[in-house]
Image: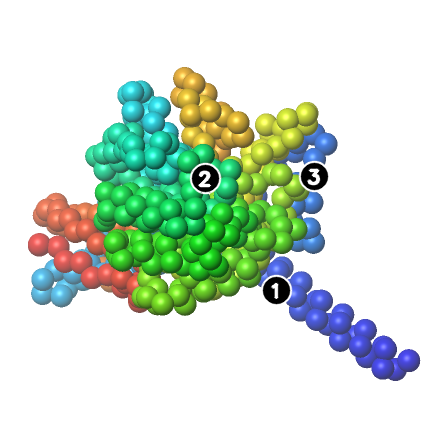
């Protein structure tokens, strides 16, 4: 009896230790917007975060964003003789962000100037829906056509939009051309090698990354025909052609579905390590691609958090490559529910610093709106578009104006990225500007020393 009582007390103490940590987190960021307080008929948002409150969940995210996405700067302003400048005006402007908002893009953008303008005004990254896939560029054996992806990449380059190479090969049998399915293993290897050499050589050095073998945890078209190391072999071949570009595994249900036995984070990382262990692949730059098609079953935010935490430990860049949220169309509040779930997924994803980009799938309804769109055909925002615009603003540093104190010091906290800082001498009104990179690697101690001309 005494032993059971002691065990009960130990468990109770452990529970309160955990809970006190969560309460401390909540106290660090005690806020909730009016928008967050709104209720949706027949739906209790708090069920998403149980056993935590929404405030506790937000507090943790806020803490992680401050730790991983932002840098606290102490800016010292002096004259050339090292005298502190009191009352100097500083104008701080963010030029670029280390985090990329991206969107799916199709060939329909090529003949639509309004769509081009909309896309370029919002996004710094793109993922082509189909235009780089093998079945698109070579539907008939021996007849390659890169007209659309060439033009789309040209548009992206002209507007500073980085593009992912999606995808070199696809392991799903249903996305192979009929002529590919009919090939013998020997002929298949020849054709696949030709495909790899053609597309990778054509765009070498122009893409931010390659999806080499798409969805090779759920599917095994090439492994069944060419052997268990087929994926690793093709990663090696792409790497040898384009060694400076990051190569991704791109997979679905790794964060979305807790019950998917084919692609949980543990299996994802095991397959990635096997690819890295293949002869010749040890120095290969690799990244983690997560499709993030949510909504086929109830969304488990705890699983999203735990999955991204585990994957982040690999120390590799993570891209969310095709993010959307599907809601049962028969539900009365489907539009509101879609926005609620989407916001929680985006907020949770953003608080993991290893997530370098989020690609929305899809942007404008011009490209089809089977699951989710940011705009209608007139490029007017949907509720999804309103949400994403709001988060885009929230997750960047607005223009900042500060004045140095009596010691010539100004303190600010900014999102990581590239900045222009203009300093105005309080006596002569002469200004000087400087640009520099802000993150915890570039400025590990957070100290910046600037001089005014005097």
Q: Which residue is mark 1?
A: 21
Q: Residue furthest top?
A: 378
Looking at the image, tell me whether mark 2 or mark 3 is earlier in sequence order: 3
Q: Which residue is mark 3?
A: 44
Of residues 164 and 228, the one nearer the viewer is 228
Q: CA distance from mark 2 to mark 3?
A: 52 Å
- Asked whether residue 342 appears in the rendered view, the answer is no
User: Which one is closest to the eye, mark 2 or mark 3?
Assistant: 2
* Badge 1 density bin: few <14, some 14–19, many ≥20, Cα 10 Å: few
Indicate which disc residue 360 carries.
none
272 displayed left or right of 261: left
Q: Which residue is mark 2?
A: 182
| Residue 422 percent location from the top left of the image | 19, 47
Which residue is depicted at the point 86% across and 78% down? Answer: 4
340 displayed left or right of 447: right
Contact (CB < 8 A) between labels 2 and 3?
no
Looking at the image, tell me whether mark 2 or mark 1 is earlier in sequence order: 1
Q: Is residue 251 above or below residue 228?
A: above
Of residues 3 and 415, the one nearer the viewer is 3
Q: CA distance from mark 1 to mark 3?
A: 25 Å
* Badge 3 density bin: few <14, some 14–19, many ≥20, Cα 10 Å: few
451 displayed left or right of 9: left
Q: CA distance from mark 2 to mark 1?
A: 59 Å
- Asked whether residue 170 appears in the rendered view, the answer is yes
Helix, strand or loop at disc 2?
A: loop
Helix, strand or loop at disc 3?
A: loop
Helix, strand or loop at disc 1?
A: helix
| Residue 295 percent location from the top left of the image | 60, 38
């Amino acid at each position: 009896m005494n032993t059971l009582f002691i065990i009960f007390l130990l468990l109770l103490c452990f529970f309160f230790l955990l809970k006190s940590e969560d309460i401390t987190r909540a106290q660090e960021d005690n806020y909730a917007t009016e928008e967050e307080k709104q209720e949706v008929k027949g739906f209790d948002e708090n069920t998403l975060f149980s056993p935590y409150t929404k405030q506790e969940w937000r507090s943790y995210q806020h803490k992680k964003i401050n730790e991983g996405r932002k840098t606290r700067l102490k800016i010292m302003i002096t004259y050339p003789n090292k005298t502190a400048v009191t009352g100097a005006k500083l104008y701080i402007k963010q030029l670029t962000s280390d985090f990329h908002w991206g969107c799916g893009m199709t060939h329909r953008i090529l003949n639509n100037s309004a769509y081009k303008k909309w896309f370029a005004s919002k996004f710094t990254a793109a993922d082509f829906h189909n235009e780089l896939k093998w079945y698109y560029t070579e539907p008939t054996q021996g007849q390659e056509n890169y007209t659309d992806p060439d033009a789309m990449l040209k548009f992206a380059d002209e507007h500073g939009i980085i593009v992912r190479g999606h995808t070199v090969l696809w392991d799903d049998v249903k996305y192979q051309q009929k002529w590919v399915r009919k090939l013998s293993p020997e002929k298949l290897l020849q054709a696949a090698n030709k495909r790899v050499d053609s597309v990778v050589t054509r765009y070498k050095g122009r893409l931010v990354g390659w999806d080499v073998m798409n969805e090779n945890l759920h599917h095994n078209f090439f492994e069944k025909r060419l052997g268990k190391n087929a994926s690793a072999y093709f990663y090696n071949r792409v790497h040898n052609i384009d060694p400076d570009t990051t190569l991704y595994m791109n997979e679905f249900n790794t964060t979305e579905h807790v019950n998917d036995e084919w692609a949980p984070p543990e299996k994802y990382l095991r397959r990635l390590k096997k690819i890295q262990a293949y002869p010749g692949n040890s120095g290969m730059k690799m990244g983690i691609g997560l499709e993030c098609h949510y909504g086929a079953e109830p969304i488990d935010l705890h699983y999203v958090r735990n999955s991204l935490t585990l994957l982040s430990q690999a120390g590799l860049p993570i891209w969310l490559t095709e993010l959307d949220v599907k809601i049962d169309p028969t539900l009365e509040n489907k539009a509101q529910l879609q926005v609620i779930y989407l916001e929680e997924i985006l907020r949770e994803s953003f608080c993991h610093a290893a997530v370098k980009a989020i690609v929305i799938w899809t942007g404008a309804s011009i490209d089809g709106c089977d699951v989710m769109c940011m705009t209608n055909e007139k490029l007017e925002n949907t509720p999804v578009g309103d949400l994403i615009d709001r988060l885009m603003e929230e997750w960047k540093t607005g223009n900042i104006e500060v004045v140095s104190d009596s010691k010539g010091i100004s303190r600010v906290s900014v999102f990581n990225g590239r900045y222009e800082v203009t300093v105005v001498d309080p006596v002569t009104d002469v200004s000087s500007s400087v640009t520099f990179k802000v993150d915890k690697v570039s400025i590990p101690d957070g100290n910046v020393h600037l001089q005014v001309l005097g």
